[in-house]
Amino acid sequence: ETGVTQTPRHLVMGMTNKKSLKCEQHLGHNAMYWYKQSAKKPLELMFVYSLEERVENNSVPSRFSPECPNSSHLFLHLHTLQPEDSALYLCASSRSVPGAPNEKLFFGSGTQLSVL
Amino acid sequence: GDSVTQMEGPVTLSEEAFLTINCTYTATGYPSLFWYVQYPGEGLQLLLKATKADDKGSNKGFEATYRKETTSFHLEKGSVQVSDSAVYFCALIPGAGSYQLTFGKGTKLSVIP
């Protein structure tokens, strides 16, 4: 148990649906992240929030919309997705920037998303 | 841009065999280097890290040395166990103030009794 909880664990949605992924951490961390994990590809950093402000946005399509209402919660709102968006979506948190000494990311178990 | 290249898997070893997973990187400046591990059904967790050239990270019998001259950070373990079966990810971050943790594709390791 890493202290980062993601719900749901599995999600199947049609291309016209709207759904949201939820991430919650009670580690007192200030930064939260969304990563996309696809087969045969490196993990892709999608969004980073630090103290509820977005600090990274890596050219992600607008059909993915993040929301960070407070430092403990992070959402990823999904609408009109494509089949190629099917992947494992991982949430992570860290106390501060991951490059700092003694710093690391804590990952949740992910939401396995299938877009039909 | 920054990138990480690690050996293609899957890798299958017998218990107590020696493990090496190769990792090389491309980055400007002085990145920090990491190995993360993902056990089945779980998220990634930090295995070890090194923040400057010639540093050796170690944890749970795994070791990796930051080699700036060869831009490498190979993961090694002298005697693997079945419980080491997982996917291993090499990663880098370009500087102390960055949030951009860049990962390789991952190498799946299976250890058989």
Image (cartoon, grey):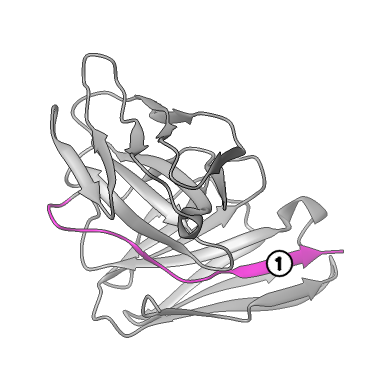
- Say which residue label 1 marks: A113
Inspect the magenta stretch and tell me whether residue B47 lies in it: no
The amino acid sitting under disc 1 is: Leu
Counting from the top left corner in percent of width and height, residue B28 is at 26, 23
Inspect the magenta stretch and tell me whether residue A112 lies in it: yes
Which residue is pictured at 27% across the width and 49% down the height?
A: B48
Q: Is residue B51 visible?
A: no
Q: Quadrant of residue A27?
A: bottom left
Counting from the top left corner in percent of width and height, residue B43 is at 48, 65
Quick check: A74 above or below B53? below
Q: Is residue B28 left or right of residue B22?
A: left
Which residue is pictured at 47% across the width and 30% down the height?
A: B6
Counting from the top left corner in percent of width and height, residue A54 is at 37, 62
Label 1 marks which chain's residue?
A
- Please state which of residues B78 and A88 is positioned toward the viewer in this rendering: B78
Local crowd at mark 1 within 10 Å, few (<14), some, or many (≥20)?
some
Magenta segment boundaries in residue numbering: A100-116
Give the SS element for disc 1.
strand
Which residue is pictured at 38% across the width and 29% down the height?
A: B2
Q: Is residue A98 left or right of residue B109?
A: left
